Image (spheres, rainbow, N blue to C red):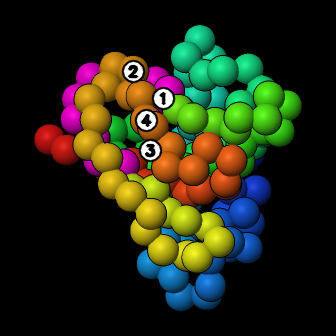
């Protein structure tokens, strides 16, 4: 499992979506306010299956919207079926973005602490936009 820093996360997103895509504009805004070590703080090691995630990156700040990059691991063959995030108690909207097609693949409303998300395609890399609903 590799935690991506801000520039690595931006590079993955930039390679996945065409120039001018709405997620890239948001990524640039969120990168300006990114907290150091955000990916490490968000990823709940006790809730996520070992080997299910190969790369994980996060842009944003605590308490606001976050844009995640997730690449599933190939170790167990089943991919990443769920993602557990250490977020404060509350309700959140998660938007799953299909990397291959550059389009919205699904939306989920969930409550945290922790936030448990069911991924639409366990074997595919995806971008996930997490927005708190207050």
Q: Decide which of tag 2 and tag 3 comes sooner along the chain.
A: 3
- Residue 20, labelled with which disc? none
Q: Decide which of tag 1 and tag 3 comes sooner along the chain.
A: 3
Residue 42, placed above or below residue 74: above
Q: Would you say residue 57 is visible in this rendering?
A: no
Asked if the residue at tag 4 contacts the one at tag 2, i.e. Cβ–Cβ closer than 8 Å, the answer is no
Mark 3, Cα crowd under 10 Å, few <14 / some 14-19 / many 20+, is: some
Disc 4 designates what residue? 117
Q: Measure the alpha-carbon separation of dots 1 and 2.
A: 6 Å
Q: Is the magenta stretch mostly helix, strand or loop?
A: strand
Q: Does the magenta stretch include residue 102?
A: no
Q: Measure the alpha-carbon separation of dots 2 and 4.
A: 10 Å
Asked if the residue at tag 1 contacts the one at tag 4, i.e. Cβ–Cβ closer than 8 Å, the answer is yes
Residue 4's quadrant in the figure?
A: top right
Residue 51, placed above or below residue 79: above
Label 3, secondary structure: give it: loop
Which quarter shows the N terminus? Answer: top right
Which region of the structure is painted magenta? 84-94
Q: Measure the alpha-carbon separation of dots 2 and 3.
A: 17 Å
Q: Where in the figure is residue 62, as x and y percent of width and height?
A: 41, 37
Q: Decide which of tag 4 and tag 1 comes sooner along the chain.
A: 1
Q: Measure the alpha-carbon separation of dots 4 and 3.
A: 19 Å
Residue, far front: 78
């Amino acid at each position: 499992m590799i935690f991506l820093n801000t520039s690595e996360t931006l590079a993955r997103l930039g390679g996945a979506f065409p120039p001018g895509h709405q997620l890239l504009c948001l990524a640039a805004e969120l990168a300006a306010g990114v907290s150091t070590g955000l990916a490490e703080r968000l990823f709940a090691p006790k809730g996520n299956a070992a080997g299910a995630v190969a790369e994980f990156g996060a842009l944003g700040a605590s308490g606001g919207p976050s844009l995640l990059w997730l690449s599933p691991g190939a170790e167990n063959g089943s991919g990443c079926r769920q993602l557990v995030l250490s977020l404060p108690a509350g309700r959140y909207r998660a938007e799953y973005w299909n990397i291959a097609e550059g389009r919205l693949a699904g939306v989920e409303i969930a409550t945290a602490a922790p936030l448990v998300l069911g991924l639409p395609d366990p074997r595919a890399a995806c971008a996930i936009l997490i927005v708190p609903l207050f």
